[in-house]
Amino acid sequence: MPRRIQQCCARTSIKISDDDFANQGSGVIVLDGGSFYLITAHHCIFGENNEYCGVTADKICVEIQDNYSSKFRRVNVLEIVEFCDNNDWVLLKIEDPCISDCDFLRIYKGTRFIEEENVRFCGYQNSNPNEYRPWGAKILTISKNQFKITLEAKTFDQGGEDGATLAKGLSGSGVFILKGKELYLIGILKSVVGEKALNDDLDCCPITNLLENLFDSFKDLSDIDFLEEYVEGLDQTKSEEDVKEWSKLNVDDFDNIIRKHRVLYPEAKAVRLTSERILEFLCQNEKLENIRSKSELIKSYENTATSFEKRVKETYTRDVADRNEAKELIRQLEEDFAKHIKDMFNDNSNYLNTELARHKVTEWLMNCSFDFQEE
């Protein structure tokens, strides 16, 4: 787990008297708009039953550790900026925590993440409040104002104690997604699901609930996931048998593409390359279908492709003098469409633009939006 997750983890409590603190929870420190804030769960500050509803900033105790066994250091709370009981969050403005080796500028705020993503969080359990503990989980389900995660490889229910009891105190912990070397805060823990932490599931508050109170931009993780999943998913998961079966069910499409390949190549090569291109098309089709529901970007891309297809019929369909002219026509169409969609994707390598353009041109060869024949 990246050390930054542990460094921005804080323990929270309410000061009742000089020696008496109550309502222990967790929180996550963020740098936003040049100032430091702590985000935690509403009930960690105001109580499960709002019993601390009148608490003031000076009575809120925020503490951090340099490592899990070091002494705690208090960070002063300057202001209760905003809170929401319904979605269970509080935003506190705090003084600079002076964590010199933590690059807060590299902890981004993430939105539009997807189900099955691996996440990480770190917080203070009531059962062991003097040491933070890191956890691994994955996103289970997502709704408008909350999402649910479930533990992986660990469980709260240990030693005969209910999971809900052992999980108590972790509310307010920051939930992160790690992408390569980049870290994205996507929300905070609210509560375990059920009195016994059923299935080790936890409800979470997405950081987008605080959009009106934060200044820095949010990173769209659906775009990142779209690119990564597409590239990783282009394995040859289909076979020649799939191509034969597809050809039987899509006779017209098969006839259209092999007719054009016969203009481009000698017979034997035309048959082989037709099969290879269909195989590639089917593999990419399956991957696009898998991520269609997870990313608004794919929907935008498909709308753009549909619009561009009208231009294909008008501009690129023609008679050709020979196979070299036909090859140049295909090359030009793939290049033009790749440029047309380039600004949609954060892909400096141009790999995705090129692959999507080839996939779409294959489709246009099949449905004859892109057509050519020898004069």
Image (cartoon, rainbow, N blue to C red):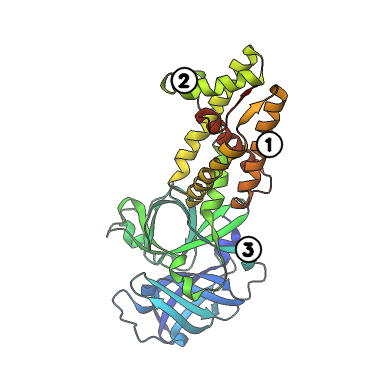
- Which numbered disc flags the more N-terminal residue, 1 or 3? 3
Residue 65 image point, x, y percent: 56, 70
- Give the spatial CA distance, label 2 vs label 3: 50 Å
Amino acid found under the numbered disc labelled 1: Gln
Q: Counting other residues with Cα less than 10 Å from the Cα at mark 2, is it few (<14), some (14-19), or many (20 or more)?
A: some
The structure residue drawn at horizontal position 63% and vertical position 67%, both measured from the top left corner, is: 105
For label 1, the residue is 332
Near-viewer residue (368 or 87): 368
For label 2, the residue is 247
Residue 262 image point, x, y percent: 61, 18
Q: Counting other residues with Cα less than 10 Å from the Cα at mark 3, is it few (<14), some (14-19), or many (20 or more)?
A: few
Please indicate whether residue 342 sits to the left or right of residue 44 in the image: right
The structure residue drawn at horizontal position 60% and vertical position 32%, both measured from the top left corner, is: 317
The structure residue drawn at horizontal position 32% and vertical position 60%, both measured from the top left corner, is: 164
Residue 103 image point, x, y percent: 65, 66
- Give the spatial CA distance, label 2 vs label 1: 27 Å
- Give the spatial CA distance, label 1 vs label 3: 41 Å
Pair 2/1: label in front:
1
